[in-house]
Image (spheres, rainbow, N blue to C red):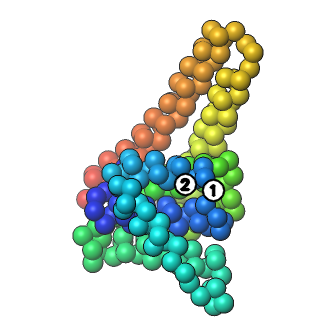
Amino acid sequence: MYITDYAKEAQARLYYFFMMADGDVSSAKRERFDQICEEMGIDDYSRDQIIWRCWKPYDKQKTSHWEHIREKILQTVRKGEGGFLSSGDLFKRNDVRISVIWTLINLGYADGEYSKAERRIVAMLTDRWGLAQSVTADLTDTAEALAALSRQKEWVKTTSKPYDVIKDTVEELDRNIQMMFDNIKALISEAEIAETEGR
């Protein structure tokens, strides 16, 4: 779920700062970020401008890398909550919040390692937005299971089993993966419906 205009840029910036939490951005995370930008309708030039702005230098003598990333993420979130921009309600809706958390967790697993720094950011936003810890735990468990299924799928393709066995196994894994994605979509949709009914 993505919003338009400034909101697209704000979400993309949030995702990129998150990827910077460990210092370097892995090629797997960068590839996933490029896919997200494409899904959001952000062109290559705009995406590269977002990345360039995220890497702007800061005074490393006064601020640690973690403090810098934490503050940049909070700045982005505050602007999206503030109401003084056209997208001021960007991070106010629970369905958007859950969708953002889900994307962050998946980015964390993109290179196979959901790091401590990345978990701290997700916990910080979960607390800030008043989301239930159980929701974040379910999202994390699902992302971890999806990563395991994806690894299993790639492994099966390399085995010497008969073609039909490999094909059937891959199709079964694909069905399980799709079912998990559908469950997450349902969770986000339920939050959107609850948000609408609560107005």
Q: Is residue 53 above or below residue 108?
A: below
The furthest residue to the front: 45
Report which quarter residue 20 is drawn in: bottom right
User: Relative to the observer, which residue lies in front, 199 or 104?
Assistant: 104
Q: Quadrant of the C terminus?
A: bottom left
Q: Is residue 59 above or below residue 184?
A: below
Image coordinates for residue 133, horizontal then vertical, percent: 57, 57
Label 2 crowding class (10 Å Cα cut-off): few <14, some 14-19, many 20+?
Answer: some
Instruction: Tell me the tag on residue 26.
Output: 1
Q: Is residue 95 above or below residue 62?
A: above
Amino acid on which disc 2 is placed: Arg
Instruction: Tell me the tag on residue 30.
Output: 2
Instruction: Tell me the tag on residue 131.
Output: none
The furthest residue to the bottom: 62
Q: Is residue 3 visible?
A: yes
Amino acid on which disc 1 is placed: Ser
SS type, badge 1: loop
How far apart are the alpha carbons under marks 2 and 1?
6 Å
Image coordinates for residue 69, horizontal then vertical, percent: 57, 74
Report which quarter residue 88 is drawn in: bottom left
Q: Is residue 194 visible?
A: no
Question: In the figure, is residue 172 to the left or right of 198?
Answer: right
Image coordinates for residue 114, horizontal then vertical, percent: 66, 54
Residue located at (64% from left, 85% from top): 60
